[in-house]
Amino acid sequence: MQAVLYICHGSRVKEACEQARFFVSQAMADIDVPIQEVCFLELAEPSIEAGLRACVERGATRVAAVPILLLTAAHAKEDIPNELAEVKQNYPDVTLTYGEPFGVHDEIVSILLERIGKERIAEDAMVLLVGRGSSDPDVKRDMGNIASRLQHTYPFQKVDICFLAAAEPSFEQGLEMALASGHKQVFVVPYLLFTGILMKKMERTIKKLEREELILCDYLGYHPNLRKVLATRVQEAMEGEEYVPTYATHTK
């Protein structure tokens, strides 16, 4: 029997975890699969081990594990596969397949434009797209791709990228360059799924600067467009071949 295991990141901020659970509960209605469970990589319960166990206890013989992550980086390439590899040893008769994060998608670019709000964009406006950040070069490449798509969708004067951690330019560097550019509007757009410590840090930083041209937009949130992308990722995962994590390093 087929199951889908949705793997969210997790957060110390309770509201962020509640948003993730609510989004997945809505997304489940779009997926015609008898067994569906949600779990978290870290900082929240249930764990991946508990999520997979719940699937098996409900009768699953095939589990499609789908990461609820924006981009493909260390969590998707290493941390989740390592955890799945370890837990899977307890269920040798269960077929495991593994899906992709949301990735670069025009449905997500349309959410960014919605968060900015076309009705308030002046002629001399730029966007500072802010990612979580990662040492994985694929993340910087993908963020650049998203920035290009956003500028193609709407003719902003400029769309720059920066990161909150582990990559450059940093958020602070991005703000400094944006303010030095002289644009009358700088839309600071968080490329984040939910509220949390990073979002609150951005709010404090921008409030402290007290610059009229800086306009902090809302994070992506669990938008209906993301449900469409997730449904595609789930279908891909269910149709995939049995997954053996390349990066698995854990052993029992």
Image: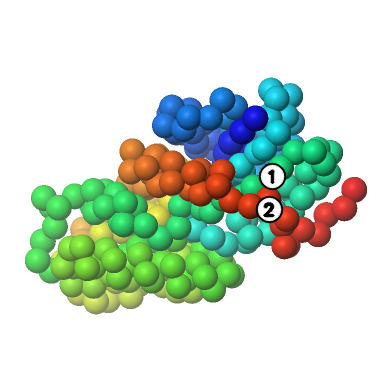
Tell me if label 2 and label 1 are in contact, CB under 8 Å.
Answer: yes
Residue ID at (46%, 32%): 31
Per the image, label 1 sits on a secondary structure element best described as: strand
Q: Position of residue 15 (x, y in %)?
A: 49, 33
Q: Which residue is mark 2?
A: 243
Above or below 210: residue 138: below
Q: Position of residue 219 (x, y in %)?
A: 37, 47
State the residue in front, 19 or 84. Answer: 84
Point out the tag, 2 or 1, that comes first from the N-terminus: 1
State the residue in front, 140 or 62. Answer: 62
In this rendering, would 180 be left or right of 169? left
In this rendering, would 146 be left or right of 100? left
Counting the numbered discs, the total is 2
In this rendering, would 245 be left or right of 2? right
Residue ID at (58%, 70%): 136
Residue ID at (37%, 69%): 145
* The quarter of the displayed image where residue 238 is located: top right
* The quarter of the displayed image where residue 190 is located: bottom left
Does residue 201 appear in the picture of this structure? Answer: no
Look at label 1 and name its amino acid.
Leu
Label of residue 96 in the image: 1
Residue at the extreme top: 58
Q: Position of residue 135 (x, y in %)?
A: 59, 70
State the residue in front, 206 or 248. Answer: 248
Look at label 2 and name its amino acid.
Tyr
**CA–CA distance in space, label 2 to label 1:** 6 Å
